[in-house]
Amino acid sequence: MDPNVRPETMERITTPELAQAFIDEQIAAVKEQVGDKKVLLALSGGVDSSVVAALLIKAIGDQLVCVHVNHGLLRKDEPEQVIRVFKDELGANLIYVDAVDRFLDKLAGVDDPETKRKIIGGEFIDVFAEEAAKLEGIEFLGQGTIYPDILESKDGIKAHHNVGGMPEEFDFELVEPVKLLYKDEVRVVGKQLGLPDNMVYRQPFPGPGLGVRCVGAITRDRLEAVREADAIVREEIGKMDPAPWQYFVAIPDIKSTGIKDGKRYMGWAAVIRAIHTVDAVTAESVEIPWDVLCTMRDRIIAEVPGINRVLWDFSDKPVATIEWE
Ligand code: XMP
């Protein structure tokens, strides 16, 4: 039997009971695979790696070493939440790496979107490899691979970073306990493992993070503006019921004229985007009520330094992609 093929008899995990049965089964399987050896896991705070971390903590405790790399492109409060949930509440053996300066220095002046992505991806692997080299006795690499990653890699749609994407010097055996699960099942398992809702049900977030929303060459001040405006938009649009599939802010590298305290105030425009989609291949813009738009406009202008306009991008995909870069 191919271990990368989901058996037809495997029941869809939709209830806490089915999730618990899956968790018990995987705890036994991981214990059997790993024995008394150590597992290294890159913990981004995303759903998949978080669920794997919580599962592995239950299975092997401090034989799991989690590495959380803060590349400076995370959303407001994300690194803090990873530390709070995993280190403080779940007692994880967590190494926090503050690599903010390192990433932002490398990205300074780079405005080409693909080059930005390559720098972020490459630097991430370098930081992770350096941390791995400092540790002794690691024989396994934990990964949050999920079933769509395997299917898409097989079909040649994309080389997913979880499937064959780690550098060759990483001669570790993989531990991938959720690799046969679909995303909705991973969320049910995460909930059963006791992870907070805002981690389990969080919206998709690109690997290069706010880097693709700080459009053009990233500067620290504009990146900070993206992070603050994004937090406001997530809070306000998050109150809509149902909330859109994905919603965020992008800030292009353009300043326009404004006026503040009787003086010219050159500022950036914060662009709000809220979309609905099934598979992210096409997407429709979601209608945001006028009062919600006004609340966000007023808060962003008042609370985020450097912004003098708020725009709403209501383009559909195609032709506009969901992200600006
Ligand atoms: P686009 O912009 O291509 O985005 O319409 C489609 C969906 O994919 C997300 N996205 C990414 N996710 N790594 C990721 O894990 C990435 O580099 C990346 N780029 C885009 C995007 O947020 C949207 O949900």
Image (cartoon, helix red, strand yellow):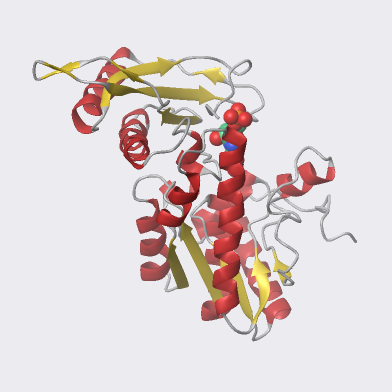
Image position of 109 (left or right of 27): left
Q: Position of residue 199 (x, y in %)?
A: 45, 50
Q: Position of residue 246 (x, y in %)?
A: 49, 31
Location of residue 115 with respect to 319 vertically, above or below = below
Query: In this orientation, which residue lies closer to the viewer: 99 or 4?
Result: 99
Toward the front, the furthest residue is 109
Residue 280 can be seen, yes or no: yes
Residue 128 lies in what quarter of the image?
bottom right
Say whether residue 309 is left or right of residue 47. Answer: left
In the image, is residue 111 above or below residue 48?
above
Residue lying at 77% horizontally and 53% vertically, measured from the top left: 10
Q: How many marks?
A: 0
* The quadrant where residue 60 appears: bottom right
Q: Assign ligand 1 to one image quadrant.
A: top right
Give residue 318's position: percent from left, percent from top.
63, 17
Asked if residue 199 can be seen in this view, the reply is no
For the C terminus, the image quarter is: top right
Q: Residue 83: which quarter of the image?
A: bottom left
Foreground residue among 3 and 247? 247
- Residue at x-position 58% and y-position 18%: 320
The residue sitting at the right extreme is 1
Image quarter where the N terminus lies is bottom right
Q: Position of residue 241 (x, y in %)?
A: 40, 27
Residue at the image position 53 percent from the left and 78 percent from the top: 61
Give above or below for 286 relative to 181. above
Please state which of residues 46 and 171 is positioned toward the viewer in this rendering.
171
